[in-house]
Image (cartoon, rainbow, N blue to C red):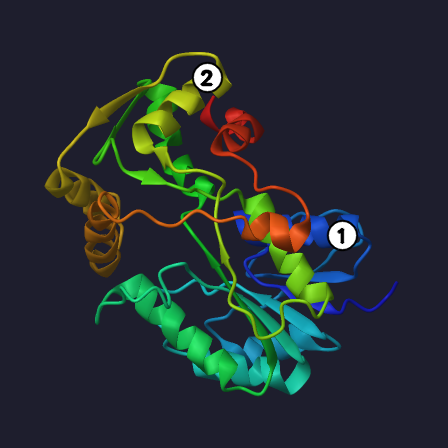
Amino acid sequence: MTQPRILVTGATGKVGGAVVARLHAANVPVRALVRREADFPEGVQAVRGDLGDPASLDAALEGVDSVFLVWPFLSAQGASDVVDVIGKHARRVVYLSSAGVGDGKEEPGEAITMFHTELERLIEASGLEWTALRPTGFAGNTLGWAQEVRTTGTVRAPLARLARPLIHEADMAAVAVQALTTDTLLGARPLITGPELVTQERQVALIGEAIGRPVRFEEISLDEAAEQMRAAGYPAELVAAIVPAQAEMLGNPEPVNDEVERITGIPARSFREWTVDHAADFC
């Protein structure tokens, strides 16, 4: 078997999993970093390792040329050591960052933007070849509504009119593979988006269309939404970051562009397409 030359972290998640699948389909040797046993197609090499334990990464990085890096923590603590270990083995890292980095809206203490900003800085200073992908909101985050859809047919959430250009994980993966396997995005920070702004109320309606039964949106207050998140176990710093950021987007929505099509040659998938692809997750 050909020695894997690309290591994918976050390989059991939506985006990392899509990167693994796309590389495998293109016959690119790929290795998946996992913390526990996981199933992958034949030919994908799964290796144990944990980004929280940099010493555990050496075996996974042996012989690797490029790394797709998804940072799973809410701070950059330990990231410097991880980047150092990557740099001992690989020559390139493609980092899944956020559209909030570099948009001029960073606020001190805003958890998500702050750790992405720090990771980008560490990678750029490392001497590695790099690309920082900056996607807008993930379509896959609406899977957080799946239990409500299945059990009540109603999604209770704030900000019915909040419109976002949610991006399909397959499009993030397509851009990531370009960055991993070609030199076209070296030193780039592409802002990648879905093709249109879709309100949360419309997102819920499209989920209903995909599963063949109506789903209703019930708007709740920001305070109630924050309390729900805390009760569900979300860290306080994440709640403090997400809820005000979403409210801010009502009057200052994320941009929409055609970077996915420019980079990959294929237009970005719509949220409607995403709901069809994931209808089974809501049934």
> In the depicted view, which residue is nearer to us: 241 or 150?
241
Residue at x 63%, y 87% (from the top left corner): 88
Instruction: Select label 2 or label 1 by which is in front.
Output: 2
Which residue is labeled 1 in the image? 24
Left or right of residue 143: residue 247? left
Identify the amino acid type marked 1.
His
Identify the amino acid type marked 2.
Glu
Position above or below: 53 against 268: below
> In the depicted view, which residue is nearer to us: 266 or 272?
266
Residue at x 49%, y 75% (from the top left corner): 53
Position above or below: 166 against 183: above
Left or right of residue 261: residue 42? right
Residue 260 point in image, percent of width and height: 58, 50
Position above or below: 125 against 226: below
Q: Which mark is residue 209?
A: 2
Q: Is residue 13 visible?
A: no
Residue at x 22%, y 36% (from the top left corner): 159
Report helix, strand or loop for mark 1. helix
> In the depicted view, which residue is nearer to us: 164 or 114?
164
Question: Which residue sits furthest top?
Answer: 213
Residue 59 point in image, percent of width and height: 67, 76
Q: Which mark is residue 89?
A: none
Residue 248 point in image, percent of width and height: 21, 50
Report helix, strand or loop for mark 2. helix
Mark 2 in CB contact with mark 1 (< 8 angstroms): no
